[in-house]
Amino acid sequence: MNEPLIVQEVPASYQVMMDSQRIRQRYKQTEVGVIPEDWDVCNLGGHVQKVGSGITPTGGERVYKNEGRPFLRSQNVGWGHLLLDDIAFIDNVTHDLFQSTEIQIDDVFLNITGASIGRSAIANGRVAGGNVNQHVCIIRTNPAQIYPRYLNYFLLSEQGQQQIDSFQAGGNRQGLNFGQIRSFRFALPSIHEQHAIATALSDVDALLAAQDQLIAKKRDIKQAAMQQLLTGKTRLPGFSGEWEVKRLGDVVTFYKGKGLPKGALSLFGTEPCIHYGELFTRYTETISEIISRTDTSGGTFRSVANDVLMPTSDVTPTGLAKASCIRADGVILGGDILVIRSDTKLIYGSFLSYLIRYEEEQILQLVTGSTVFHLYGSDMKKFTFSMPSLPEQTAIATTLSDMDTEITALEQQRDKTRALKQGMMQQLLTGKIRLIE
């Protein structure tokens, strides 16, 4: 007797797997992934007029001029935009020797050697008629087939950078040759859709540029406020008393952190701690939240709220002009951290940290060393400054902190826009989202 057939529900995990493998209607599987069926996969070399670079003039920088023909180097090519603050120039005589590398508007630049390999940008009117050196490749497309700005976005995309990486031995970005560049393969929609995709991404770039400009403006305003408020040139409302000139060693006590090698940091450690390297990269003038943890507890040095922390060694002297006021008690402070401890009735720590960062030139005069630079309590005790009353110190630091909070919020908004752009590139350059049906 036959057993009855039992039909069971397909497991959800299996259904998800099948859905992920199913190709959407009107799409096709290709070597570059699933793309719309009306898109092609192209070799870059079949759709360009030129792939080539220039050379550095005989004499190198000695032949550069203050004006003339723009001479583009790898440092002038950023991630999607040109960096022309330090553009070099050559005269017409030198330019005539390199006419084959003369820049035209809408040429695509691609850095092909060194640490900046993979950066790309589009030629504009400021550099048209100039030349490039051997580290920058000019890609001149057939504009009826490839819209230059579409190609630029492909080069900057995850897919483009992966192809660039694939040509680098051992994952070490050394250099690209012209044959490798011509062999780039990517999904290519109609020229009309290329324009639509590039326009959408350009709109996001314009928003990013506006956000960067606003952030730069706010930073300039903060710098001007520091110059006025920390020197007493401008007084906040309600304050008028005289400031006193002080020598730091007369009003604080210096200590030094202990131990805490980087290997002692633990993601799930029980003790909050600060490694000296974090003073360079993770903390600003005020430390309100402790990032790192450790399980080390014995033989340590711990913070007192209002302490000001500075690194005591760095490979550059300017790196030592960093100061951060910690707001928490009992945080383990690692070696190579100078701890400046003051009477909370006399000095507001955040005011002092803002002041130290502002007085970078004075800090540089106190630094010792040649290969590795050092700054100790015996050096910082010579630091001199004008000290207002404690309430005015607090008001100044609060004003500057509010500016920092605004700048941080703008930076977070800008970072979200960058993430949005990356997502758009992934969706638009693969046809997962269509702007044109």
Image (spheres, rainbow, N blue to C red):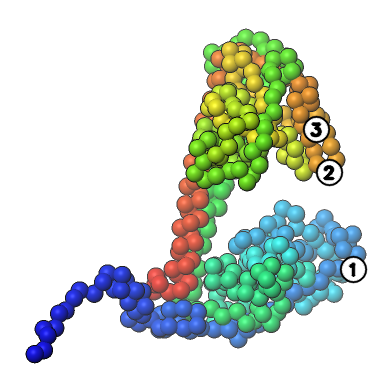
Which dot marks residue 391?
A: none
Distance between mark 1 and mark 2 Cα atoms: 34 Å
Q: Is mark 1 on a helix, strand or loop?
A: loop
Give the quarter of the image for residue 228. Answer: top right
Instruction: Tell me the kind of residue under disc 3.
Output: Val
Tell me residue 302's x, y (percent): 60, 27
- Residue that label 2 marks: 371
Q: Which of 370 and 30 is in front in this view?
A: 370
Residue at (65, 78) in percent of width and height: 181
- Residue that label 3 marks: 367
Tell me residue 119's x, y (percent): 65, 64
Give the quarter of the image for residue 355. Answer: top right
Q: Decide: is 246 above or below 359.
A: above
- Residue that label 1 marks: 58
Distance between mark 1 and mark 3 Cα atoms: 41 Å
Q: Is mark 2 on a helix, strand or loop?
A: loop
Residue sticking out furthest to the top: 241
The reply to whether the C-beta atoms of the residues labelled 3 and 2 are less than 8 Å apart is: no
Residue at (48, 66) in percent of width and height: 425
Mark toward the start of the polypeptide (1 vs 2) = 1
Instruction: Tell me the kind of residue under disc 1.
Output: Thr
- 233 displayed left or right of 22: right
Q: Decide: is 391 above or below 338.
A: above
Q: How packed is label 1: few (under 14 Cα within 10 Å), some, or many (20 or more)?
A: few
